[in-house]
Amino acid sequence: MKHLEILSLIRGASTTKYLFVFLFLFAAINVESQVKVGDSLPQFELFKQNSQWFNTDEIKNEKGVVFFFFKGKPSKKNTILKQYKNKHNLFKNLDVKVIGIGEDVIEDIFEFHKNERLPFALLSDSRGLALALFDMDEKKLKKGVLGFTFVVKKGKIVYIANIKENIENQIYTALGKFIEGN
């Protein structure tokens, strides 16, 4: 819809109609901005656990799993990270890079990475920059969602999943996406 058409809809409308049109347009814009299967991996740059920059160009032409975990219950975050750690060799055998992104500050990411000896990159998104690019603000409010997993092949997203209670099944599903049509 063109701007003039929108303005003509709004002109002369009651407050209720105006509100309805505004909500409709907001919803349409919001839906279009969500990352979907088939979309390119959003471009971002964040600090890794070693205070070096990570840029998505590093996995643009490769296979990768990008997973987000949210602040909150530390035991749930630990479960997600430890499951990815325990299954890391399966990803490594398929030449898949694993990247975890958390809302924690870089100092906390560094400590956790060091203490748990994680074999994959852990990025700090304490300002929510990558979360916004992946349109995660609304999604993370859903009850029971602990994080999200994005499977990437050659720069394109081929699978998206909520991280709920059974992270292990989700990891196996993600692994399966790399075996399919490899």
Image (cartoon, helix red, strand yellow):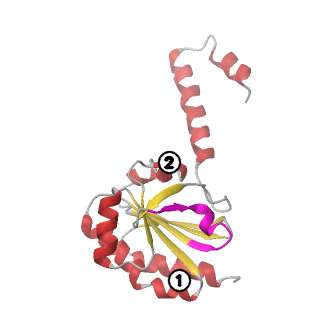
144 sits to left or right of 152: left
Q: Check disc 1 and report the residue beneath it.
A: 91
Q: Residues within 10 Å of mark 1 (few under 14, many from 20)?
A: many
**Residue 74 percent coordinates (x, y):** 25, 65
**Residue 158 percent coordinates (x, y):** 64, 68
Q: Residues within 10 Å of mark 2 (few under 14, many from 20)?
A: few
Amino acid type, residue under disc 2 in the picture:
Ala
51 sits to left or right of 134: left
Quadrant where the N terminus lies? top right
Residue 169 got which mark? Answer: none
Q: Residue at x 67, y 65 (%)?
A: 155
Q: Earlier in the sequence, mark 2 or mark 1?
A: 1
- Determine whether the residue tagged by mark 1 lies in a helix, strand or loop: helix
**Residue 120 percent coordinates (x, y):** 45, 76
In the current view of this chain or complex, which residue is farthest to the top?
A: 12
Position above or below: 13 against 170: above
Q: Residue at x 45, y 52 (%)?
A: 139
Amino acid type, residue under disc 1 in the picture:
Phe
**Residue 124 percent coordinates (x, y):** 40, 58
Residue 61 in magenta stretch: yes
- Determine whether the residue tagged by mark 2 lies in a helix, strand or loop: helix
Write down the region rendered in magenta. Answer: 52-64
**How many numbered marks, from 0 up?**
2
In terms of depth relative to the viewer, which is nearer, 113 or 179? Answer: 113
Position above or below: 168 against 25: below
The residues tagged by marks 2 and 1 sit, at their Cα atoms, a distance apart of: 27 Å
Residue 132 got which mark? Answer: 2
88 sits to left or right of 71: right
Q: Residue at x 73, y 19 (%)?
A: 4
Position above or below: 8 against 29: above
Quadrant where the C terminus lies? bottom right
Q: Residue at x 38, y 52 (%)?
A: 126
